[in-house]
Image (cartoon, rainbow, N blue to C red):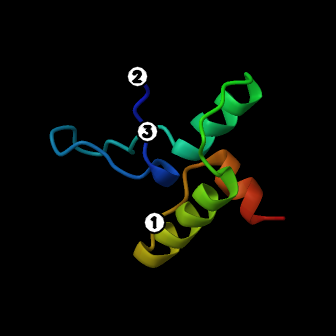
């Protein structure tokens, strides 16, 4: 099992200052690189991460998402 969230958003209500989760975009990129088929459209996922972080005014914590947005 892998637990992640779009753009690394999230956190923990019990751990003050918790930054969030591993970014789903980064996990999918890793799995693709390992030859593991996920069925997830990485570009669409990264676009969603960009959209949601801009909408709520939070930084995008996905390395892959930020790189794809810069192209």
In the rendering, at what x and y percent does residue 60 appear?
55, 58
The image quarter containing residue 33 is top right
* Label 3: element kind: loop
- Cα–Cα gap, marks 1 and 2: 27 Å
Name the residue beneath numbered marker 1. 58
Query: Which comes sooner in the sequence, label 1 or label 3?
Result: 3
Q: Is residue 16 left or right of residue 59?
A: left
Tell me the number on the disc at residue 1: 2
Query: Which comes sooner in the sequence, label 1 or label 2?
Result: 2
Q: Nearer the viewer, residue 60 or 39?
A: 39
Q: Of the residues tagged 1 and 3, which is closer to the observer?
A: 3
In the rendering, at what x and y percent does residue 57 appear?
45, 73
> Residue extending furthest bottom?
55
Name the residue beneath numbered marker 3. 4
Residue at image position (61%, 38%) is 28
* Label 2: element kind: loop
Residue 31 drawn above or below residue 57: above
């Amino acid at each position: 099992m892998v637990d992640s969230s779009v753009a690394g958003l999230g956190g923990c209500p019990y751990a003050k200052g918790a930054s969030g989760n591993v970014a789903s975009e980064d996990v999918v990129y890793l799995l693709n690189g390992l030859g593991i088929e996920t069925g997830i459209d990485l570009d669409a996922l990264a676009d969603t991460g960009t959209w949601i972080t801009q909408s709520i005014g939070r930084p995008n914590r996905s390395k892959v998402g930020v790189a794809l947005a810069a192209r």
